[in-house]
Amino acid sequence: MSSLQVRELPENIYYQLKKQADQDHRSLAQQAVAVLAKGLGVSSSPKERRAQLLQQIAQESVLDSTILSDPEVLIREDRER
């Protein structure tokens, strides 16, 4: 997982974030992630991210079943690289 360090964070923002974290029973880092996710309009929930990814995979099925049905073709292509 990636990390982010914020320098020169204004104190009023820090204290507001800390206050919200305490109210939501989260750590400061967890609250920062939740606020960033909400601001960006993305989900920070692993279950929701997995569901979206599975839906995207189902919609963008790019696998050709004829290629996958013959392992020899895949091995030959790999060896020719």
Image (cartoon, rainbow, N blue to C red):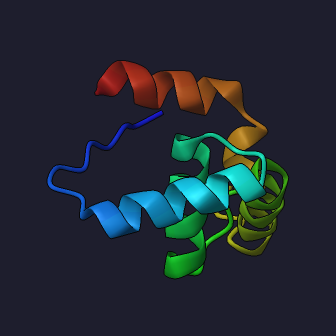
Q: Residue at x 37, y 37 (%)?
A: 3
Pick the quarter of the image with the C terminus: top left
Residue 60's place in the image compared with 27, above or below, is below
How many marks on residues?
0
Residue 38's place in the image compared with 14, above or below, is below
Q: Residue at x 68, y 71 (%)?
A: 60
Q: Nearer the viewer, residue 34 or 61?
A: 34
Position of 15 with respect to 66 (left or right) is left
Q: Position of residue 34 (x, y in %)?
A: 61, 60
In which image quadrant can residue 13 be found? Answer: bottom left
Q: Nearer the viewer, residue 56 or 19?
A: 19
Residue 6's place in the image compared with 51, above or below, is above
Q: Residue at x 43, y 31 (%)?
A: 77
Position of 18 with respect to 14 (left or right) is right
Q: Position of residue 12 (x, y in %)?
A: 35, 68
Q: Nearer the viewer, residue 20 or 34?
A: 20
Q: Residue at x 39, y 58 (%)?
A: 14
Residue 35's place in the image compared with 26, above or below, is below
Instruction: Tell which residue pokes out farthest to the left in this image.
Output: 8
Q: Position of residue 52 (x, y in %)?
A: 76, 66
Q: Nearer the viewer, residue 70 or 51?
A: 51
Q: Position of residue 44 (x, y in %)?
A: 67, 58
